[in-house]
Image (cartoon, helix red, strand yellow):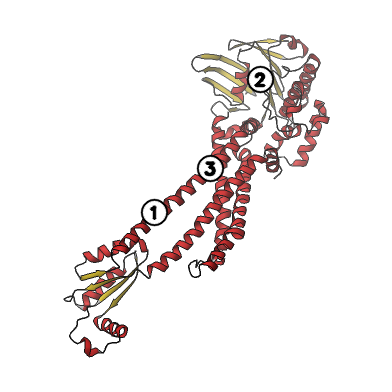
Amino acid sequence: MGRISRYILRKPALFFMGALSTFLVLFLINTISLGYLEFSKLREHWRERFMVRAFFREDVSEETMHKVAKEIAASFYITQVVLVPPEEAKKRFLERTGLSPESVEGVSFPASLEVVPKYIENLLDIVRELKENPSFGEVLYGGQEVENFLRLFQLFVRFSRGFFLGVLGFGVCVIVVITAFSVQLRRREVAVLSLVGATDGFAFSPFFLEGILFGLCGGIGAYLCAAFFLFPLLRLAEEVFPGFFGVQIEEHLLWLFVLDLLGGCGMGMVGTLFGYLGVRQSIR
Amino acid sequence: MAFLEFRNVSKVYPPNVRALENVTFSLEKGEFVFVQGATGAGKTTLFRLITREERPTKGEIWFSGRRIDNLDSQLVPFLRQRLGVVFQDLELVPEWTVYEHLVAPLFVLGMNGREALQAAKKMLSLLGLEDKSFFQVRCLSGGEKQKLCVGRALIHRPKLVLADEPTGNLDEVSAMEVLKLLFEFSRREKATVVVATHNRALLGCFPARVIFLEKGRVWEGER
């Protein structure tokens, strides 16, 4: 520890830069992670409102209906499939309208399949597949406006994924470059240690530990910032828009803490490793 | 077998600079040897081949019964741990203190802090740098840096010491002090000490074997 503390004290700006860059990247990741959790809740909320109803053709046997329902339920993108037989459809209709059974005498109520997608953005694909299935006569899902909304939603999902990956990639690059730079600045120390017979492990260990240390500092900073700034902000939003922000923050405190610590340490270690490898290649 | 042996060693730097040509000599344990040659004669290359900072183009180098010119790169640190080297360009870190430089080889060898501190104190008193132990190297004079470099080479009591122009930055009195230190170390520790110098005047000051280097070739003389 003596060697590491001397390294840090000698060039505290490098340590501070490393910790700050880790903190900023992890804070951004925390914000995006919480945003993603809210987004998942929103998806769930919408999913139940965008159920697909596919009506079986009149000539389809009950056995075939069960078979088709089973096949569709096996799809990864579908979370729930309910087969509504003609009697149940009639019962529901009468309950909803308050009419007597006699008044609908002679009217046919075809069997249908209620399909709930796992992800709202896959709804249109599911509709397409159901329409292509010869067992169904009609597929209802909401019409043109829903289609437009879903296209917008798909675009948003793709953009969000790209944005998250971009932020993550850029953040990791920044940390790696800063830590690698800080090791490069100490090239002479590594060279001298190597000349007096230090093994790679001996020469690298202070840098490696320093990387872990500033990663930890950045990670803890990001976690504290999330706990004392992001979470209160979400709670405030929940009070202003009741029912919309449904994420239970307390459930996520532990994994967020672990994510920040491991993320910080990992980035610090990878950065110092790259820096050391760069230095190692250039010394005798 | 000799303690250190060069067998027909040549070193050619690209594109075609012949630094050493068919160099053959051997050194025994406890010898004090001067390698004398003009600037560019190949003295530093000779040392770099021993420390494995360079590999020979041709020939074999044996140290303590083991061939080192083709030593696996992972074993090079262990070879260097057995050597004490005074580098021509000193190889000091300006931000490190005198004490840190002295204990570095000891820590590399796994010595604990207390023992290292004792050894460093002893070496500082030998070098006359007791009052500068916690000075950063950037605050030292050229001569003090040179002495520090010698101290770092001797502190872990290696059996082979290579001193490349150890008196280069020193006045006559200090130069003699440093050479005396190296000579006494050789006698006390039965260590082989090789001193490279371009200064012919130094050769007569100590009873030593002399290897002459000129344009990459060697021949020997005795004083």
Pointer 3 indicates a residue of which chain? A
Residue A107 position within the rendered picture, expressed as x and y whole percent measured from the top left: 19, 83
For disc 2, the neighbor class at 10 Å (few under 14, some 14 to 19, many from 20) is some
Provide the residue designation for mark 3: A174
Are dots 3 and 2 in contact, CB under 8 Å?
no
Between disc 2 and disc 1, the foreground one is: 1
Say whether mark 1 and mark 2 are on the same chain. Answer: no
**Residue at 41% across, 52% down:** A159
Residue A221 position within the rendered picture, expressed as x and y whole percent measured from the top left: 62, 53
Pointer 1 indicates a residue of which chain? A
Where, by quadrant of the figure, is residue B78 drawn?
top right
Provide the residue designation for mark 2: B27
The amino acid marked with disc number 1 is: Arg
Say whether mark 3 and mark 1 are on the same chain. Answer: yes
Q: Nearer the viewer, residue B210 or B73?
A: B73
For disc 3, the neighbor class at 10 Å (few under 14, some 14 to 19, many from 20) is some
Give the distance between the C-alpha atoms of the residues marked 2 and 1, in whole angstroms: 73 Å
Are dots 1 and 3 in contact, CB under 8 Å?
no
Residue B189 in view of the camera: no
Between disc 3 and disc 2, the foreground one is: 3
Mark 1 secondary-structure assignment: helix
For disc 1, the neighbor class at 10 Å (few under 14, some 14 to 19, many from 20) is few
Provide the residue designation for mark 1: A158
Q: Nearer the viewer, residue B54 or B172?
A: B172
The amino acid marked with disc number 2 is: Leu
Residue A72 position within the rendered picture, expressed as x and y whole percent measured from the top left: 28, 68
Where, by quadrant of the figure, is residue A272 drawn?
top right
